[in-house]
Image: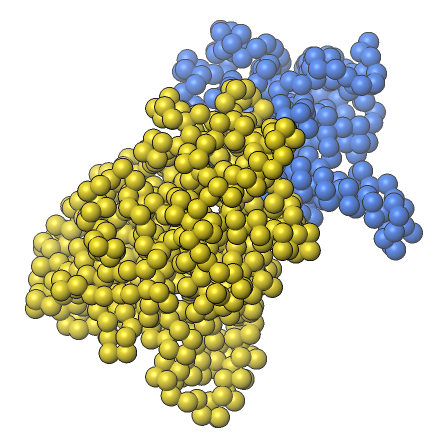
Amino acid sequence: MNGSGIEITKDLTIPKLFLSQCKKYGKEKVAMREKEFGIWIPFTWQDYYDNVKYLCLGMVSLGLKRGDKVAMIGDNRPEGLWAEMAAMCAGGVGVWLFQDCMMDEVKYIIDHSDSKFFVGETQEEVDKALSIKDDCPELECIIWDDPKGMRNYHQDYLMSIKKVQELGKELDKREPGLFEKMINEGHGDDLCLLFYTSGTTALPKGALLTHWNMLTMGQNLMSVDPCYDTDDFVSYLPFAWIGEQMMSISCGLQVGYTLNFPEEPETAPENIREIGPHVMFAPPRLYEGMTRQVQVKYIDSTWIKRKIYEFATKVGYKVANLKFEKKPVPWQWKLLNWVAYVTMQKKLKDHLGMSRLRHCYTGGAAMGPDHFRFFHALGVNLKQIYGQTEVAGISIVHRDGDIKFDTVGTPIPDTEVRITDEGEIITKSPSVFQGYYKNEEATEKTLVDGWLYSGDRGFIDEEGHLVVFDRSKDVMTLSDGRPFSPQYLETRLKFSPFIQEAWAIGDKREYVTAVMCIDYAVVGKWADDRKINYTSYPELSQELKVYDLVQLQIEEANKDLPGPAKIHKFVNLYKVFDADDEELTRTSKLRRAFVGNRYKDIVDALYSDSDIVHIDTKITYEDGREQRIKTDLHIQKVNV
Amino acid sequence: MVQVGELKEGDTILKLEDIHMYFGKVAALAGISLEVKKGEIHSIIGPNGAGKTVMMNCINGLYKPQRGDIFFKGQRVNNIRPYRRAELGISRTFQKLELFGGMTVLDNIRLGRHIHLKSGVVSGSIYVGKTKQEEIDSRKFIEEEIIDLLEIESIRDQPAHMLPYGLQKRVELGRALALDPELLLLDEPLAGLNLEEVEDMARFILDLNEEKRWKVTCILVEHDMGVVMDISHRVNVLNFGNQITDGTPEEVQANPEVVKAYLGEEDLYATRR
């Protein structure tokens, strides 16, 4: 049993839970809100039920059967969640795609998953589906929900969500009770989601998850950090990311908190501020973005505001450090912290939409200790989470009052975590997935005797906290033979507001080097203030004064690093790493092997005597267009 | 003459007959005739100084031609002032942005709606009855039809002068749309935009022209030949105040005089491809 009083049994499925929650709350409670046309539009649990029911029956009348795959793509919006729930209610399996997937990725996933239905949002997604339809023989029906630009599409396998729901209503009249009957046929061990992992090395793999996996995951997390049905959650991260599924479906449905969908992806920060969520889960890059935003605003603000900020952060850091050391906070510091709260923290938290935040998690990638401390100094209860798609979300989390910024916490209930002799992290829990779809070989490697082999290297410290070092294959050996995590270096570098991305190189080399991507907006502003002229990112990145600026940031990060890990040389890249160029995964993790290959010339130059490297390459836009780039990059040494 | 009242697609919405416009002794327009049908995108092209903008100014009433007649929906509008023509359904954007820089995007667009607000001072000051309903309707119209169409949700509360040029152009289009026009005069809407912004803008123009909700007739002055030839139903070519030809894009491209006067020997499509 968890806080919501729901018992998770093998018989329970997500649709069954959905049905009972809809009955429980009915018209009385808001299940979700969407900001549309400038106002927040509420949907009650009854609306949620009606929409899912007719959409589900509509898809059934179009031929959806138990076990069929339904692919979905689009921004976070109620219709997306309805489609997913509708597919599950009919016994189907949901397959989510990242909104910004390129054509090849869409084609690979639709084809590999044997998806029969495709639910897109706008003309853009419909176009993607239409252009791959001939290559995906299983794909039968394409559904869209935004009519904009759809006036000239007349294919008979193309339909609006509204039309499908009308078909559903007709079926409901012919066969009343069918919806409930289909839901009751489900079992906890049935598949509910086919989740494609981002894959830092190879093609995405499809992880198979059951209702039982998803529900136990949610239950175990909620028993650590209970949420309430009066809470608000903002759903703005891609549904194709397991973290969002976990919050919106696994936890959200059990607890019954209100999901809020922003108007557009660009308005998300504003909309988060309007809602003031109670719980938040985001990958580190979002927190990094917030930190950068605060740091930049600080530089821009008036003298008095800067002084107040400096005072308040000083107090905040002191208090946070005491808490990290689990020491009591003396009353005079408590008093000072209250002053800091009134003068600065309160307002800043309001601007970041964190005023009401009770639990706030980061996971999905490594977060630097500097960022972590920064949020605690603000009084935000930020906690690390560790997990993967293959355990339906997470397995490890920090507990309140037991937070260490270099660890990811301790296992959630029902979860066992061990370290193999090779140092690999392995997990066993009811949420461990069923295997990879149509990939026996990978399944055998990953699932051994019910243990999930993560491919991450780490250790468990004396207090039982798990420390994740890095992906096993990414760990680099320094010149003195000791292993080191490049990710750790990179997160340190990224604490500077001027640095957006960094790539540390140095495996089995004499010294460590880095490829840096400056933050265009922040460095651009910095350059404007100094009357440095530039027209584009490539030009700004090669400006010598910008190089000196980046050097200062590196020297700052170098300070706390052991000798052999210090960065000796760097180069500013002419662009930012991008998932469209396959340099990052869709969840923004650096694909080291790929960039190592792609920027081989740069790496070679960093370990030679030359101070310039000639580049001739191409970049890809989201619509598939390519542009050739020819430029010279300057290499600069750092004072070590 | 053309009939007055509701027009069907294909009826003449605007007719210019033998327009002459002089500035001193310079003939900016020397006997121009033009017929625009409802539902069309009618483009006007020509080299710089050909009189394109002067023609736009004559249509919307900023300039008064010395000779010739202008008919809008069958009504002679020569002597009607610009703001009255706006009420009749003629709306425009400007080659050089004419936004109110200090005002927010939303306020700029609402300003375009002002002409349709009919409630009086008293009702307005206490915000009841008619005013309230009018405000609600106009909010609905602006949010659901304009902001959603132009995808400017994220900037609606920002001051216009802070925005990049491409977005300012969009806002200007938004303000023109707030008038709920039947005829939209677009004066170089693509000038100064990058490739992506051009594609967006061309799509908006097509949406406005084709979408059932809008069905706006457009007169487009533009130098981007790729877009003009792709989206126009008819093209009118001017040169030094004289009309060279008026026809479908294919006819215009095949006209040797046009090629000589304006397009040069290059392939028409070479411009932005």
Front-most of A126 and A524?
Answer: A126
Q: Residue at x 44, y 80 (%)?
A: A316
Which residue corresponds to the image point at 88% horizontal and 48% vertical from the top-left? B129
Residue nearest the viewer, comparing A277 with A308: A277
Residue A350 visible in image: yes
Q: Describe the colour scheme in one phrase.
A: by chain
**x then y, percent, for residue A285:** 38, 58
Left or right of residue A523, residue A348 in this image? right
Q: Quadrant of the C terminus of chain A?
A: bottom left
Query: What residue appears at the point 21 percent right and 72 percent down from the top-left corner?
Result: A561
Q: Residue at x 24, y 71 (%)?
A: A460
Measured as percent of width and height from the top left, residue B105 is found at 64, 47
Q: Is residue A477 left or right of residue A272?
A: left
Chain drawn in blue: B
- In this rendering, would A401 be left or right of B40? left
Quick one: A84 or B211, which is closer to the camera? A84
Question: Could you say which quadrant of the image residue B11 lies in?
Answer: top right
Q: Colour of chain A?
A: yellow
| Residue A241 in sight | no
- Across and down, in percent, residue A255 comes to 53, 60
Residue A521 to residue A139: above or below: below
